[in-house]
Amino acid sequence: MAKNTLHTQKSATDGPSVNPKFQAGKRPAWTVEELERAILVGDRAALAAGITLVESEAAEDVVKAGTLLEKLLPHAGNSVRLGISGVPGVGKSTFLESYGVHYLESNEKARLAVLAIDPSSSKSHGAILGDKTRMVELGRHERAFIRPTASSGALGGVARATKAAIVLCEAAGYTHVFVETVGVGQSETTVSQMVDAFLFLAMPGTGDELQGIKKGIMEMADLIAINKSEGEHAPAAKRTRVELQRALQLSTRDEFNWTPTITLISALESQGFEELDAAIDQCIRHSRGQGWFDEKRRRQSEYWFEVEVQHALRSVLRRHDGLQAAYDDLRAKVGQSEVGPLQASKLFIEELKCRLDR
Amino acid sequence: MAKNTLHTQKSATDGPSVNPKFQAGKRPAWTVEELERAILVGDRAALAAGITLVESEAAEDVVKAGTLLEKLLPHAGNSVRLGISGVPGVGKSTFLESYGVHYLESNEKARLAVLAIDPSSSKSHGAILGDKTRMVELGRHERAFIRPTASSGALGGVARATKAAIVLCEAAGYTHVFVETVGVGQSETTVSQMVDAFLFLAMPGTGDELQGIKKGIMEMADLIAINKSEGEHAPAAKRTRVELQRALQLSTRDEFNWTPTITLISALESQGFEELDAAIDQCIRHSRGQGWFDEKRRRQSEYWFEVEVQHALRSVLRRHDGLQAAYDDLRAKVGQSEVGPLQASKLFIEELKCRLDR
């Protein structure tokens, strides 16, 4: 593809040195046009600034971010997007560091962006941020870009920002985007709506409670890697593989009817990575071959349209002259226990319907 | 309070035997009026059926559930609501079982409802359900009611159902409601919007990654209990307490300026429960004394009003004659990549604004 070739020729590596604004050590005041141009030639500082822009909830930034995304969208879509998850303690950071480096070393045309969603801290803006500093080698790699997305409260906001960050990374020429998410539950469901395949990290001899949690996540896993399978853990890792295979047979699989591949790896000793490469490759090729790859992305686009509408609705209705007064009035009454939340919601919706049908 | 006295006199224990509909072994077709009456006298079968009703997303059930909630709301609000969380493996089920039994045994007028949110399985409807069967003794207790809420996809749906379940439990005379949530992140934020205090379970010598996750959650914890502090773990538990105290000093605290109490417990050996009782009691009394208790509930009501409006909006707009066509058309175009999700959302919102301002 011409677009991809262009990206491969342009270098994402000269990053910070490209733009003198960044070197000055101050936060550069990019215009949207500058960001667009710089991101398209793979300028890392611009990419970072662009992601900061799409994460922002300030009104002026939201408008700018929308313009930037519209301009970059035609240049996006050319990467393989892989979701990565696993319960806390499974070694996600170590895995991303060592597998990321391996991945780049064995694919010399690959450029890897790692986006990490951290939904655990709504107040301190990123408890896990510290973790990323552990990815020292990958962080220094000339063809890698690492970006943690701190939660600003609602998971929906983080999800939208991460979805936008994928677009920006692809426009900047990254051929592979790993979206990492922390642990358990809801964030995986959201991430599965933005990736082509989902890799779930497990570990040998996981306890009862983890097995329970695992089940839900395994239902959305396309690939499973059992980490920490080195040395003395090898027998336990093999047993876990058998158990997981059994569990997979029992669990509901989606319509695509793909049976997840289970690979034994050791992030610590960089073992089993070739097998994992092959498993990922096979999964993506299978998906493309069956037309599922495009079908999945098509459905994901529709999903994100719904999310965007849902997100926009709130501010539109609250800022609408006539409706705002009704909303604020009902909200206050709820606060005073004069009316219940459910009843108040009904009253507001009736007001809205009246206006729509006028 | 007269209302409370009534509830204490009526027994929640005669549960299943009260209603012959249940004994027939078939799912009873309750009317809303029957449910209301039976729940108010503490009929457990009715309470269970009522929660099933508020969890349902079928259109007819949603209407019924709304009516039931409106009728029961005036009888709700009289319990102490405690959120309980902790990373997987910390022993939440064991804790709920042993502390729940202790709690009921030491408060003979207490009736305890345990609601568990399980956001991890969106496809199999409740991976953690199996866990609850572990609460054998508590489950058999005449003054206990245990109910897991399986996720039906969006966390928002589960949250609304759990919020409604609290209302039902309170109307049924439960004086204490424990809302348990699994592990990490977003579900805690949601649960903190429906409880009076949040208890976070930790364990001795937690690893690096858990420490990171902990930070975000600790910021919303009002109480911390270090589980598994028995025997040989005691020294490690004490060190963890010191570490947590240090971390608490560093973390941002909310405006209520309450410093979380840290208690050492052992769910396995039922140790430290009196100290935990005292800590919970102190926290709630402090909160009431300062007027925070009511202020928190007031804000939570406003929050739930916003959630309800947000939830209702989607169906109203999608079912609206004129708007539905625009929505479906844009959604299809997004699927065909004719327009991006963000741009399509903007177009829809403009259509909506036009109609509102007509």
Image: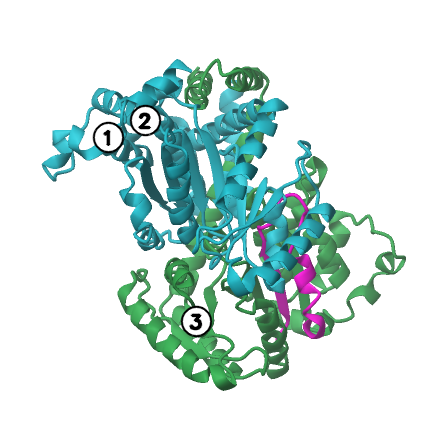
Chain colours: A cyan, B green
Relative to B158, A34 lies left or right? left
Task: Please report the bounds of the magenta region as a residue range.
Answer: B109-138
Q: Position of residue B60 (x, y in %)?
A: 71, 37
Residue type pointed to by label 3: Ile
Callout 2: SS = loop
Marked residue chain, label 3: B
Residue where numbered disc 1 is placed: A46
Residue where numbered disc 3 is placed: B224
Q: Position of residue B132 (x, y in %)?
A: 67, 64
Residue in the picture at 50% in, 42% down: A274
Confirm whether residue A328 shows in the render. Answer: no
Marked residue chain, label 1: A
Residue where numbered disc 2 is placed: A172
Q: Position of residue A10 (x, y in %)?
A: 28, 22
- In the rendered image, residues at marks 1 and 3 fall on the same chain: no
As measured in the structure, the alpha-carbon distance from the residue carrying label 1 to the one carrying label 3 is 43 Å
As measured in the structure, the alpha-carbon distance from the residue carrying label 2 to the one carrying label 1 is 9 Å
- 2 and 1 marks in contact (CB < 8 Å): yes
Residue in the picture at 32% in, 38% down: A145
Residue in the picture at 77% in, 53% down: B34
Residue B166 falls in which quadrant of the image? bottom right
Closer to us: mark 2 or mark 1? 2
Residue occupying the far bottom of the picture: B231
Relative to B285, A8 lies left or right? left
Residue type pointed to by label 2: Ala
